[in-house]
Amino acid sequence: MPIVNRLAEFHDEITAWRRDIHENPEILYETVRTAGKVTELLESFGLDEVITGIGRTGVVGVIKGKNGGAGKTIGLRADMDALPIHEITGKEYASKTEGKMHACGHDGHTAMLLGAAKYLAETRNFDGTVVVIFQPAEEGGAGAKAMIDDGLMTRWHIDEVYGMHNQPGMPVGEFGIAKGAIMAATDEFAVKIKGRGGHAAKPHETIDPILVGSQIVTALQSIASRNADPLKSVVVSVTVFEAGNAFNVIPQDAILRGTVRTLDAEVRSLAQERFTALTTSVAEAFGATAEIDYILGYPVVVNHDEQTDFAASIAEGVAEKGKVDTGVLPMMGGEDFAYMLEERPGAFIFAGNGDSAGLHHPLYDFNDDLIPIGCSYWVKLIETALPAAA
């Protein structure tokens, strides 16, 4: 595999960074130690600028090319945060913090971008400017939006932006990418059903919120089966149903919570509209009421055509032809890199993590064999997009 030899020499060093971050996971915007380590390393590499506190705990590094940074500016993003999961891998570098672990590989993403930054700062074999973006709170905190709101794109005049995520089940050395929607919008809901409680032996004197909630759960499945275009994906999942605490009491209230996932803006709006109509009308039909809290989460991750073709060509240069799937199927998981792609053209690519446990699983671990491959992808992308003048 044509990885960059100098990056292969960094492999052990980058692996050590990754495992140190893995041992010390931090969630959401609590990435103080991680951001501190990233800042310390970037400063030791001799970057032109290292700025902290962007999006609360985000870090931005600026590397200017041989021409002093004039011309195009490209952003490369890695996420830093972990998840509230108890790790059971048994690795010698397993999480030292109870109930927190890097179960999505953000430790690897951070380490690979650090490796690329070290190489790019050392060689400067490009013209223009590279902005390396280390983001907190991808896992539900919209850290990408927080960094954008702090001027990420405008302050450093970023023209294009690229992201990468490891993919369990895809062989190490392979990549997957596609034009258009590649990851879903992730909306949430909470519904409080208000009925009338009473004795379980006298249901006729009550308005049973459990019965109402059950009917709502069933009705919501019609959004996908009868409202949305069958060729356009939508998932409605009720994941929490809370009601009652005694065998002989029909409760007063019930709570439903869950998520709606879509890959199309129109379908997203349709799903919200039908969710509200169905939930309200079913509750009313039984004499109950429904209080709905529908929260619009991350938007759809939409890859831009030109940048997707470019990213695929870079991946093929690293992984060899035939090992880049340019028609990878969209995933219904979410990713807040969507906000960055709404602001600037760019592309999000998946890199194989091999035969590992799935993302967000307590047995998951980032595959360190991916490190020189991912680093080489970043470096080749910059050196090709921003070629140095002869």
Image (spheres, grey):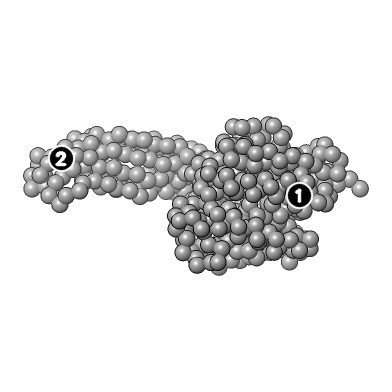
* Disc 1: which residue: 45
Left or right, 165 with respect to 322, comes to left
Image position, residue 291 (x, y; %): 30, 34
- Residue type at mark 2 is Gly
Query: How many numbered marks appear?
Result: 2
* Disc 2: which residue: 197
For the residue pair 285 and 113, the one nearer the viewer reads as 113
Q: Which residue of the protein is positioned furthest toward the right in this rendering?
A: 390
Residue at the spot x=60%, y=44% of the render? 135
Image position, residue 307 (x, y; %): 69, 46
Task: State the CA–CA distance, disc 2 to disc 1.
Answer: 66 Å
- Residue type at mark 1 is Phe
Residue at the spot x=73%, y=57% of the render? 376
**71 versus 325 height, above or below:** above
Residue at the spot x=74%, y=39% of the render? 49
Left or right, 10 with respect to 22, comes to right
Label 2 environment density (alpha carbons within 10 Å; few <14, some 14–19, many ≥20): some
Q: Which residue of the protein is positioned furthest toward the left in this rendering?
A: 202
Badge 2 marks a residue whose secondary structure is: loop
